[in-house]
Image (cartoon, grey):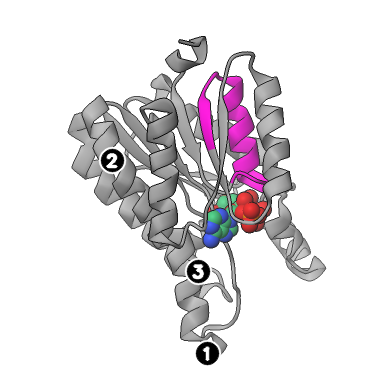
Amino acid sequence: MTESIMNPVAIVTGASRGLGAAIARALASKGYNLVLTYRSGASEAELVKSQCEAAFSNIQVVLVAADISLEEDCKHIVEVAKETFGRVDVLVNNAGMTRDGLAMRMSREQFTSVIDTNLTGAFSTSSLCLPIMVKQRKGRIINISSVSGVYGNAGQANYSASKAGLIGMTKSMAKEVAKRNITVNAVAPGFIETDMTDALGEETKKAAMERIPMARFGKPEDVANVVAFLASEESAYVTGQVIEVSGGLVI
Ligand code: NAP
């Protein structure tokens, strides 16, 4: 029996880059064994795995290729966690995508593809992890929503709906499992420096910057630190909440 078997276990979806990669590194530095998922970025995921292993001496990190919009892939992620580690203490539903456009020109497929990944994917992984957490009488689910899901954003009817849906799901699940020592919370980032915001035009970035009281975009670590807190014992009495990490974007 290796010592790593005593470590708590976290699943982080979409951990090949951006926020997911930073969340994986933050949890690694706290001694979690990790199941990290990615969709297409196998080499990026390998790099994150080695960064995590370097962050803490005795953790085990497993990579799983999975498209979170597919139920069988979600089942596979949770199966790997169960078979490798025998438990799941923390689930971070981070994988997400955008397919922006004005609602009047948005196809139904453009709408549902974003919902399938950002919302239904998180539902699947959560509903599959909850029975394990209930049995353990311990668990943390952290959903990465967005300020778009709280306040709306022109051009993001699909994305905002998925992220607002995550908030509703967070609150409902929190009520369902609170008595079982399981907390469910959401983090709503504002503008964070990742590939997702890199894709925004210069005009949009400039306009966004003018609305941020802290006058800077966030770093992935700004979000990862909040996720690490919500994963920890220190947040035991926090559930059903949405924590904005946005430099004060909306005060
Ligand atoms: P990102 O750089 O675009 O990374 C997205 C991650 O999700 C990648 O690891 C990607 O995997 C994975 N992914 C995308 N679609 C997937 C699918 N169908 N199945 C499995 N994995 C999938 O995004 P990010 O900026 O880090 O964002 C992470 C989360 O934070 C998202 O939920 C996003 O909506 C949310 N968020 C971000 C910001 C921001 O400013 N960056 C603000 C608010 C909320 P591959 O690369 O391997 O395909």
At label 2, the amino acid type is Leu
In percent of width and height, residue 95 lies at 54, 52
Q: Which residue is mark 1?
A: 104
Tag nearer the camera, 1 or 3? 3
Tag nearer the camera, 2 or 3? 2
Q: CA distance from mark 1 to mark 3?
A: 16 Å
Say the numbered circle drawn on residue 21.
none
Residue nearest the observer in this picture, 8 or 188: 8
Q: Label 3 crowding class (10 Å Cα cut-off): few <14, some 14-19, many 20+?
A: many
Dot 3 falls on a residue whose secondary structure is helix
Q: Is residue 26 above or below residue 72?
A: above
Q: Which residue is mark 3?
A: 114
Q: Which residue is mark 2?
A: 130
At x 32%, y 56%, the residue is 168
On screen, residue 43 versus residue 38, left or right, reads right
In percent of width and height, residue 49 lies at 66, 33
Q: Quarter of the image for the N terminus: give it.
A: top left
Question: In the image, ligand 1 is in what quadrant?
Answer: bottom right
Tell me which numbered mark, 1 or 2, is placed earlier along the sequence. Answer: 1
At x 52%, y 79%, the residue is 110
Residue nearest the observer in this picture, 8 or 205: 8
On screen, residue 168 versus residue 28, left or right, reads left
Q: Is residue 121 visible?
A: yes
Give the extent of the magenta segment.
15-35
Q: Is residue 182 above or below residue 243?
A: above
